[in-house]
Amino acid sequence: NAGVMQNPRHLVRRRGQEARLRCSPMKGHSHVYWYRQLPEEGLKFMVYLQKENIIDESGMPKERFSAEFPKEGPSILRIQQVVRGDSAAYFCASSPSDNSPLHFGNGTRLTVT
Amino acid sequence: GEDVEQSLFLSVREGDSSVINCTYTDSSSTYLYWYKQEPGAGLQLLTYIFSNMDMKQDQRLTVLLNKKDKHLSLRIADTQTGDSAIYFCAERTGGYQKVTFGTGTKLQVIP
């Protein structure tokens, strides 16, 4: 049973470009979470999704950031018009239900030049 | 609101016990978790405890929960160099059950 798959592992974007981060949850998991980790800092919650629904996006910046988890395919975290401050590791996690432990992917490291 | 705090750094000698502490503020926590992060990797679930439990033991790991003081600890017995990593505590809270992480404690094991 494959774990949580995130791609790409590393992503380099110039300021103003768009970044698309993909996450395929573990098989049988319908709950997806996105977190951001800045260098030498902890994980900051961004958004919690179930299939086709955003459950909690209280950690998402109001502008430029969006997330989706369609009926088919991976969850996507999209950052438009990236700025240097968006450089971070973005982690996706999944769980089979809303009270089960989270299982994490290895993250996507975004660098904005 | 949710706020989870940990000390930033802990150094122990190989073979000693390590105790990593965590405090949280939300009394509606249902589950509390401990995760381990090695450099360049994602977070690995180590163990978790349901909020109506006081203690859970799993091989070298012992979790203690003091719900009155909102204090959680992770004890690693016979600490090894391979235990060097960042350890995060996390709580599941809220009506929608989101998971909030602490700042992480960097454990350094001295041979």
Image: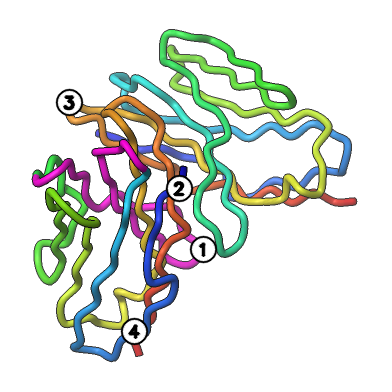
Q: Dividing the picture into quarters, in which one does residue B56 lie?
A: top right
Q: Horizontal placement of A78 versus A110: left or right? A: left
Mark 1 lies on residue: A40
Tag 4: amino acid: Val
Tell me the number on the disc at residue A112.
4
**Residue that appears at 72% across and 50% down:** B84
Label 1 marks which chain's residue? A
Q: Horizontal placement of A50 versus B84: left or right? A: left
Mark 3 lies on residue: B95
Q: Are marks 3 and 4 on the same chain?
A: no
Label 3 marks which chain's residue? B
Residue A99, x across and y down, in percent: 31, 25
Label 4 marks which chain's residue? A
Q: CA distance from mark 3 to mark 4?
A: 35 Å
How many discs mark residues in the rendered view?
4
Mark 2 lies on residue: A3
Task: Determine contact: label 1, label 2, CB under 8 Å.
Answer: no
Q: Quadrant of the C terminus of chain A?
A: bottom left
Q: Dividing the picture into quarters, in which one does residue B73 lie?
A: top right
Q: Dividing the picture into quarters, in which one does residue A108 lie?
A: bottom left
Viewer-side label of 4, 1: 4
- Label 1: how many Cα within 10 Å (few below 14, some 14–19, many 20+): few
**Residue that appears at 28% across and 68% down:** A21
* Start-end of magenta stretch: A27-52
- Label 2: how many Cα within 10 Å (few below 14, some 14–19, many 20+): some
Tag 3: amino acid: Gly
Q: Secondary structure at mark 1?
A: loop
